Image (cartoon, helix red, strand yellow):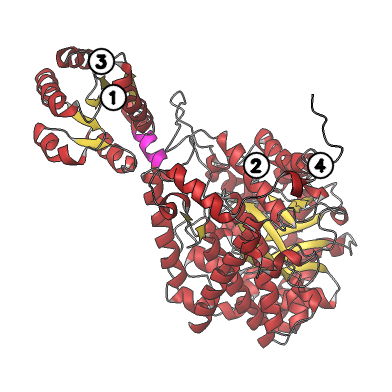
Amino acid sequence: MSKLSDKLDLKKDFPGASYDEWKLAAEKDLKGVPFDKKLITRTYEGIDLNPIYTKNDIENNPLAENFPGFENFVRGSKPDGHVKNNWYVSQELPYPTAEEFNEALRYDLERGQTSINIKLDKATLHCMDPDMAEAGEVGIDGTSLSCINDLEKAFNKVDLQRYHIFSDTVYNSLPFFSLFAAYLKKHKIDKVHGCILADPYSCVVRCGQPGYDTDSAFDDMYKVTKWCIENNYDIKTIGVNGTNYVNAGASAVQELAYVISTAIDYINRMLERGLKIDEIAPRFNLTFGISTFYFMEVAKLRAARILWSNVIDAYKGKESSKAITIHGKSSLYNQTQNDIYVNLLRTTTEAFSAIAGGVNSLHTNAFDESLGTPDEFSRRLARNTQIILQEESHLNSVIDPAGGSYYIESLTAAIAKKAWQIIQSLDKEGGMLEALKKNIPQSEIAKTAEDRKKDFAKRKNVIVGNNMYANVKEDKIALKDRKAEEIHRIRSEYIKRIRVEGNTGKHGEILEILQSIANNADKTIDLAVEAYLKGATIGEIGKTLPRKDPDVSVETLNFHRASEIFEELRDMSFDYKDRNGYLPKIFLATMGPVKQHKARADFARGFFEVGGFDVIYRKGFDTAEEAAEEAKKAGAAITVICSTDDTYPELVPALMKTLKAADKNMKVILAGYPKEQIDEHRKSGIYDFIYLGADVYKLLKDLLTKL
């Protein structure tokens, strides 16, 4: 028996082959198929992914030589990464009332959540009290918070100084920030940290036309930021939310470019109002939507830090201003309503890439988020996804685990360069807002979204459980009842009582303070805090702030989920079942022995199960008459002929004759696409063809509509 060597010498024992040798071997395996066509992958970002990367790909790329906390911060904003302090587990708790929010918050903080993520409802975001808003705007997809009493309930028995705070107030943070500051003042809390963010363009792309002018929104952003600086509040006040673009179908490069371009606009607006770059930059938080393309997402987050560093360099900011804070949020675009437990797996890969990419805080979607407000069970699984990645997968033990990867470093550089090109082009248009007015980002995202839709429809891209591997045993999933009318009634009655109670002794004082707010811009926040402490509501504060008519109107983004078109098909099948007592049936005419029909029959079954059809798949048939008889017995309105191209010229005419004789309305589809036979088969009466690359959505919708 040979003796094993004492030492392992990788270089000596495993001499490496050259790239050319590898490529030659790969081309041999391809058996004549062009290398570039088969092994090069083109992404929606316009980046060609090679099948293999080597050190030659990063020879002129200095990124891998950097260290966390230095230079362009590609490897992380902090020298110690997550080793000393974990990223914040920042789960949204979108419950309608302060009491429900508090119950969920206290429960989750005891079980691993480390950030208080306050998601506000639409009414609160628009500075409206519940009785000023409509049902559907109050307590839906967020919490209704209008006054000090609400915050007392929301934060009952919660030590705010222990936890990171996060809230995205969208167009204007001043009304809610002042309410929060009033609560802190009342309870003598002076050490809090986190983010209460204003992001005016987020409202622009969602609403099209905000309720008032952008100058007023930026004036208030300036006031909040300056107030935090002067009062030494460790609160970030300026946000840019990239999930808007991701949830409309944007590519990683588009999201990154639009986020950085928006940040540049915001910097300029704050500079115009007298702040300095090193006062502005530390107050930023960038939010990115995290999608399922694992390596692309890791590289995107690393590229974001490079671009931010470049921007701050351009404004001559100091080194510490280049360290950006990033919040990650799992993309709703990838969430499905069919086979919803697969969402758990999607969220896991998204969380993994967000953490490997270096986020500072993270929200991971509950698996049933697309159905409505999550419950305790789905919240626990979403939260524990992050905790397992900390405690069991030990992702917090190494800083930038992707650093040095030939692939990741090359991809990071490619994303950064392409995003920078878009940023420069938007700058020539006058900045992000001007570009939005010209419909440039919206139209570019729409093109990408349409490309994605076509690829999903043709199953070039897979959505597990939807356009492939459908769960045929699944019943129709019901959306959760959000009880919008009841929530609106309860909250409206509550705020009216609050106003009556507040008016009994202090109404005059409140009115006097509110009038002062309108006339004293320099003390807006201090006066708002005083008014809240006297009993004012967010709606009353909102009405007193000086405003002008809207100065911008743009095309809104088309928010959607990738799986919606396939959910539409399944819903049509369920509707059919409601009317007829059974799902629409597809009969497979499997002709000849197993080896002759099986491949195409298996393909056909998967194809039609995407639409929720009941696929009748039996043994192979020897004659056309036998197949036609079984199709008639099955009661199917559609038959799919499954065999080989060689047998079709003789088989199809015979089958068509017998099938039509049995049922003249029978639609007959051929599994396969023999190009030279297509015209003849159509003359025979074949309705359509199914094959790799066929538009499954278009065909199935056509069939279901006719049924």
Q: Magenta region, mostly helix, strand or loop?
A: helix
Q: Earlier in the sequence, mark 3 or mark 4?
A: 4
Q: Return the residue at label 3.
A: 634
Q: Position of residue 672 (x, y in %)?
A: 26, 34
Q: Position of residue 395 (x, y in %)?
A: 77, 47
Helix, strand or loop at disc 2? helix
Task: Work out which quarter of the rendered image holds the N terminus and state it.
Answer: top right
Mark 3 and mark 1 residues within 8 Å of each other at the beta carbon: no
Q: Earlier in the sequence, mark 3 or mark 2?
A: 2
Identity of the residue drawn at 35% across and 26% down: 599
User: How far apart, in angstroms, are the residues tagged by discs 3 and 2?
Assistant: 42 Å
Dot 4 alpha-carbon crowd within 10 angstroms: few under 14, some 14 to 19, many 20 or more: few
Q: Return the residue at label 1.
A: 586
Q: Is residue 103 left or right of residue 258?
A: right
Residue type highlighted by circle 1:
Ile
User: How far apart, in angstroms, are the residues tagged by discs 3 and 1?
Assistant: 9 Å
596 lies above or below 39: above
Q: Nearer the viewer, mark 2 or mark 4?
A: 4
Give the numbered dot on residue 130: none
Residue type highlighted by circle 2:
Thr
Task: Work out which quarter of the rendered image holds the C terminus and state it.
Answer: top left
| Magenta-colored stretch includes residue 516 | no
Q: Earlier in the sequence, mark 3 or mark 1?
A: 1
Q: Which residues are magenta?
A: 566-572
Give the numbered dot on residue 8: 4
Q: Earlier in the sequence, mark 2 or mark 4?
A: 4
User: How far apart, in angstroms, are the residues tagged by discs 3 and 4?
Assistant: 66 Å
Q: Is residue 263 left or right of residue 355?
A: left
593 lies above or below 515: above
| Magenta-colored stretch includes residue 567 | yes
Q: Return the residue at label 2.
A: 348
Residue type highlighted by circle 3:
Ala
